[in-house]
Image (cartoon, helix red, strand yellow):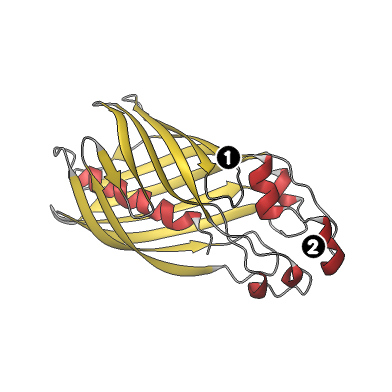
Amino acid sequence: MNHTKPALLALLALAVSAHANEESDSHFSLGIGAGYNSGVYKDYDSSRWGAVPLLHYEDQHFYFDGGSAGVKLYNSENQALTLGAGFSGNEFKPNRSRDARLQQLDKRKAGVSANLNYSLDTGYGSLQTGISQDISGKSKGTQIDAQYGYTWEVSPQFAITPAVGATYASKKYNQYYYGVSAQEAARSGLSAYNAKGGINPYIDLSAQYQISPHISTFVGARAEQLSGAVKDSPMTDKKTEYSGMVGATYNF
């Protein structure tokens, strides 16, 4: 399962927690989520559901959501600037591929990144931007994300949020996860491939329902158009990546 998807699950649970406790200065929630990811690698066993526990704490100065943690450098009613660290990146294990050539490639591991994020609630939707830099020595790459979403409160208990956004992945990031070195090409029979940086646009749709003052549920889906740098890799065979999420949280 793509390592970024549990993080998306945590973000959705975070949204549920905030919706359920919007009058409080601090939020603490526990829950369970399950996510589906179509994967991008060729003949790769990644298209499956996976469960993940959700733990989230947030106050005026700190946040922790299970996949990342950090501090709030600035926080007001409609703006927030945070600095933190968390898991990021993709994952490729050669023995999970059914393609004999991909089985000869090197393993790619998820890394740890430093994250700087900014959010703005305009009253007509929310803007979220962030930059993520790998600090674990895996890809040594950078990702920049920008998203705009609008939350429609159908009722006091039920809210729907459509969103559009795009993620830029640097050359180093794409080369680590989708490039094929000369050594790998020689032993696998694949063509050597030097990946460039690229932009992946995406659309999101999520919904949150507050069953009680303490229990909330969420569901979400994402479709992400892969950049040419990813699509042209001999390691991949898809143009679009799909993911789905569902879960529930208990808000204290």
Cα separation between marks 2 and 1: 24 Å
Place of residue 127 in the rendered image (x, y in percent of width and height, measured from the top left): 41, 30
SS category of the residue bearing label 2: helix
First in sequence, mark 2 or 1: give its number. Answer: 1
Label 1 neighbourhood size at 10 Å, few (<14), some (14-19), many (20+)? Answer: many
Place of residue 32 in the rendered image (x, y in percent of width and height, measured from the top left): 31, 64
Place of residue 97 in the rendered image (x, y in percent of width and height, measured from the top left): 68, 72
Residue shown at 82% from the left, 68% from the top: 188
Taking depth in this image into account, of 96 and 124 the one nearest to the observer is: 96
Along the horizontal axis of the image, is 143 left or right of 32? right
Along the horizontal axis of the image, is 231 left or right of 218? right
Place of residue 67 in the rendered image (x, y in percent of width and height, measured from the top left): 39, 53
Q: Is residue 196 visible?
A: yes
Query: Does 36 appear above or below 230?
Result: below
Looking at the rendered structure, the number of numbered marks drawn on it comes to 2
Give the numbered dot on residue 142. 1
Which residue is label 2 attached to?
Answer: 184
Taking depth in this image into account, of 46 and 244 the one nearest to the observer is: 46
Q: Is residue 239 visible?
A: no
Residue shown at 32% from the left, 51% from the top: 65
